[in-house]
Image (cartoon, grey):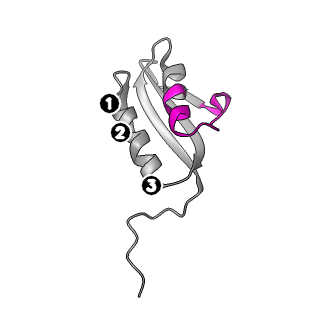
Amino acid sequence: MSAPQDTLFEFPCDFPLKVFGHAQPGFAQAIAEVVQRHAPEFDAATIEMRSSSGAKYLSLTCTFRAESREQLDALYRELTSHPMVKMAL
């Protein structure tokens, strides 16, 4: 019998990370820098951006190669503590 898995992902895998925040100058750049600290091969040019209907918020999708659960946990911790981030999924 094998040990139970604590994740549903098989690593490495391509991981789409969604980050939400107020639409403001420098938001996408700041998020790209955080993601690149945890996934150095991440290409910021691949970020997908969407504005809310009132253009008050911006949603970013950053797809990168996730290597481990620990990498994802560290990235989420840094993103959720970032002052520009309202939510990360």
The span from disc 2 to disc 3 (Cα, nearest Å) is 12 Å
Q: Which residue is mark 2?
A: 77
Left or right relative to 48: residue 9: left
- x and y, in percent, of residue 82 in the image: 36, 26
The span from disc 1 to disc 3 (Cα, nearest Å) is 18 Å
Is 57 colored magenta in this rendering? no
Under mark 2, the amino acid is: Arg
Depicted 47 relative to depicted 24: above or below: below
Is 39 colored magenta in this rendering? yes
SS label for mark 1: helix
Under mark 3, the amino acid is: Arg
Q: Residue at x 43, y 40 (%)?
A: 75
The span from disc 1 to disc 2 (Cα, nearest Å) is 6 Å
Q: Which residue is mark 3?
A: 69
> What label sits on residue 81 in the rendered view?
1
Q: Residue at x 54, y 28 (%)?
A: 32
Magenta region = 33-47
Q: Are marks 1 and 2 in contact (CB under 8 Å)?
A: yes
